[in-house]
Image (tube, rainbow, N blue to C red):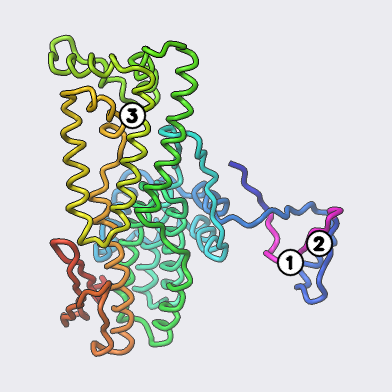
Amino acid sequence: MKFVSNLLTAGCILVTVCGSFSLKADEPKAARDAANSKAVRSTVAPNAAGIYWQAFSAMPTLKDEQKKSFDTAATSATTPLPADLAQTVSQFRVSLHELHRARSVGPCDWQLDLDAGPQLLLPHLQKARELSRAALLRARLRFAAGETDAAISDVLDVYKLARDCGCQPILISFLVNVAIEKMTNDVLAAHLPLLKPEQLDRLAAELQLLPPTSDVANCIQWEERLFGDWLARRIDEQAATLNDPQAGGKLLRLLGADTGLESELQPKPDDTEGKRKADLLLSLTVAEVRASLKQMRADYAELGVIAKLPFAEQAPRLKKLEDSLTEARKLTKREDAVRYFSTTLLPTVSNVLLREEQFLARRGLLEQAIRVQRQGADALQPVRSQKVEHKKTAHGFELRCPVGNGEEVIVVGKAT
């Protein structure tokens, strides 16, 4: 991935066809001076991902007790803050400065290798989780010190990072978006009573300006194309090498090394049932291996349709698909073997669909919490067509709404 330093303020300079700079009369003097200098300036489009990577590279390596204290404090929004936390968080100063800078840059492209299939690297996701914890801890310290405007800024920075983690619709990226936003919601809700009306208004407005979040249906469609296309290419490449229509078993062995499934085809000597299944799979033809890919794509498509249904309608259709996959895993007949890719590579999405519904409910509850804090309980509105229950507490209030077989809760005003 290439990163470009020394970016000029967006819109400050225009590049003509011949490559020279033309300047508008109303541009800031600093921009005009920079353009007239001998320094070579880049004119590539802005990209928040490049700024995030600068933030990641500047993160400190915490050790021993300092790391333990930091990790403990970050476990929840109400965990007591240790006395030495401010000193620890101060080590993230440069990283948090870059995080804040990235909020003003809309586009985010992580430059992922979308042809890599199962070897796709996503190192930014864990880095983003680590940086978000530092930012939220600093926000809590700032809230406690009465620096509410600065604390709000930290919170908004993390929301933008979370959305940018999920900007490419891949399921794991979506789940990291969900996890970071959940912790951010908890921190913000715990401190809402500290905010003035104008701050609440600003917060509500800023939340509406955040980038959109991907959805599970879109992630499934993306993964079907990314992984299915990769598998199709590998089948073509390996089949051409083998040059034997009957060598489906050898083809599966080669593909297994790429996907981590080779153990399925190499049972232990004393595993009679495993050997029976492996023999059936290894007897497939190349045409049947291609048919297995076609079936996997069809099952991905069905998952995508299910994910677009209202949550209450997803369960029965999803159960029918999952039951058919469970039966196919028994490998009792040849048709089961042709469904091999579906039974081994298709993502399990039942929990992901529930998390999506919970995530959207929490987002709605946060919006209502800001509304109630600003206008009172009479201003409360339904969330995703569900009635929201309001309950006063010693420190503020709680909002609840049903989701699936349970409920989502947001607790307002329990800051430490």
* Mark 2–mark 1 CB contact (< 8 Å): yes
* Mark 3–mark 2 CB contact (< 8 Å): no
x and y percentages locating residue 58 in the rendered image? 51, 49
Q: Is residue 377 visible?
A: yes
Task: Give the distance between the C-alpha atoms of the residues marked 2 and 1, in whole angstroms.
Answer: 9 Å
N-term mark: 2 or 1: 1
Reply yes or no: does residue 304 show up in magenta.
no
> In this orientation, which residue lies closer to the viewer: 299 or 142?
299
Query: Where the C terminus falls, by quadrant?
Result: bottom left
Find numbered disc 3 in the image and state the secondary structure of the residue it sits on: helix
Q: Residue at x 32, y 67 (%)?
A: 185
Residue 225: name its quadrant: top left
> In this orientation, which residue lies closer to the viewer: 352 or 71?
352
- Residue type pointed to by label 1: Cys
Task: Give the distance between the C-alpha atoms of the residues marked 1 and 3, in whole angstroms.
Answer: 54 Å
Q: Which residues are magenta?
A: 6-19
Task: Say which residue label 3 marks.
Answer: 292
**Residue 141 vertical position relative to residue 321 in the rendered view, above or below:** below
Q: Residue at x 31, y 20 (%)?
A: 262
Task: Say which residue label 2 marks.
Answer: 35
> In this orientation, which residue lies closer to the viewer: 295 or 132?
295
Q: Taken as a whole, is the magenta stretch helix, strand or loop?
A: loop
**Residue 154 vertical position relative to residue 173 in the rendered view, above or below:** below
N-term mark: 3 or 2: 2
> In this orientation, which residue lies closer to the viewer: 414 or 81?
414
- Residue type pointed to by label 3: Ser
Q: Nearer the viewer, mark 1 or mark 3?
A: 3
**Residue 199 vertical position relative to residue 411 in the rendered view, above or below:** below
**Crowd band around label 2 with a 10 angstrom C-alpha radius: few (<14), some (14–19), many (20+):** many
